[in-house]
Image (cartoon, coloured by chain):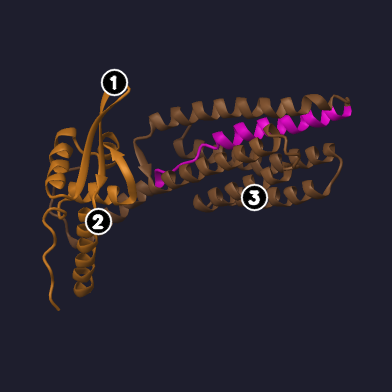
Chain colours: A brown, B orange
Amino acid sequence: MEEKKLSGQESLELIQGMIQVARDEHYETGYGWLIWGWLLFLASVSSIVLSYLHRGEYISWCWYGILVIGAIVYTFGHVLRKRKEGVQTYIQKLLSRIEAGFFISLFSIIIGEVLLKRGVYAFGYYYILYAFWMFIFGSAIRFRPLITGAVINWVAAIGIFIVEPFRYDMMISAIAVFFGYLIPGYILRREYRKKMKL
Amino acid sequence: MEFKELDPILHSQLRLAVISLLISVKEAEFTFLKEKTNASAGNLSVQINKLKEAGYIEVIKQFKDNYPQTICKILPAGIKAFEEYVKNLQSYLAAGK
């Protein structure tokens, strides 16, 4: 950029152009949604299979497993992405704070429900929490498929509270994850690739 | 109608571009500013220093993965100056119509 005397109109255009450039810096790869989506989908399907095979005792291990794998892969990806970024937008900062709050809330429920064995059936609450996170995230980046995903997950949560037995809850879970996570995740990834010309 | 003089610190193409970028983000690396403004490293460095001396931005120099990293952040005085600049610019343009 060469230094030159700017007219009023040129100054205004320069300001608008630079603000637009900064705004475009916020991008979503869809990576996190796909990782969690596939893991939750596999855990739900595995739970259905185990339930039909009368191996219910392994279901909780299946869910612990995906949480551990998900947390490791997601943290690794998050660190890698942070290293690549040359800029931090206000929206990224806010979303990462909400994301941290979401995971703390999620693990608080898991600890309360599972590890302390308080006997509260909290499975539906996870979907309420996920839906809340998707709704905020989708609204912040103005991405309608995630907002739709949030609505699907809220409906799924109500379904999980009403429907019995457990294997039907897992079917609802698999459907909610497929439409709520995986489809928006793939749309986000496609848009990211288009934007980055990959 | 009385016109206020446009802030000479901001009324420069590169400095205005840098401030406009920084007003929209929380913080930005030097490399990001260089890429988005298409400026040379030397020129950008000089203009960033002028903004820093005016108290409009903060420049943080640190190491990341063993490489030096320069991060720029806009300060409240910079936000105020930018808002004032835009307000004055708009009144000039409105008067010219």
Query: Can residue A90 be spotted in the picture?
Result: yes
| Residue, far top | B66
Q: Of the residues shown, which amino acid type is indicated by label 3?
A: Ala
**Residue at image coords 46%, 44%:** A97
Do the residues bearing badges 2 and 3 touch, measured as CB atoms within 8 Å?
no
Residue holding disc 1 = B66
Residue nearest the viewer, comparing A77 with A9: A77
Which sits earlier in the primary sequence, circle 1 or circle 2?
A: 1
Q: In the visual, does A115 lie left or right of B67?
A: right
- Is A113 placed above or below A5 here? above
Q: Confirm whether circles 2 and 3 share one chain.
A: no
Q: State the SS at label 1.
A: loop
**In the rendered image, which residue does mark 3 sit on?**
A150
Q: Residue A172's x, y, as percent?
A: 78, 42
| Crowding at mark 1 (Cα within 10 Å: few <14, some 14-19, many 20+) | few
Q: For residue A169, which numbered disc appears in the image?
A: none
Q: Main secondary structure of the magenta part?
A: helix
Q: Is residue A71 a member of the stretch shown in magenta?
A: no
Span colored in magenta: A24-52
Q: Quadrant of residue A44?
A: top right
Q: Up-down: is A163 above or below B82?
A: above
Q: How much space separates mark 1 and mark 3, taking CA atoms?
A: 42 Å
Name the residue: 11% across, 65% down: B5
Q: Residues within 10 Å of mark 3 (few under 14, many from 20)?
A: many
Residue drawn at 13 percent across, 59 percent down? B7
Chain under numbered label 2:
B
Q: Nearer the viewer, residue A133 or A56?
A: A56
Q: Is residue A28 left or right of residue A59?
A: left
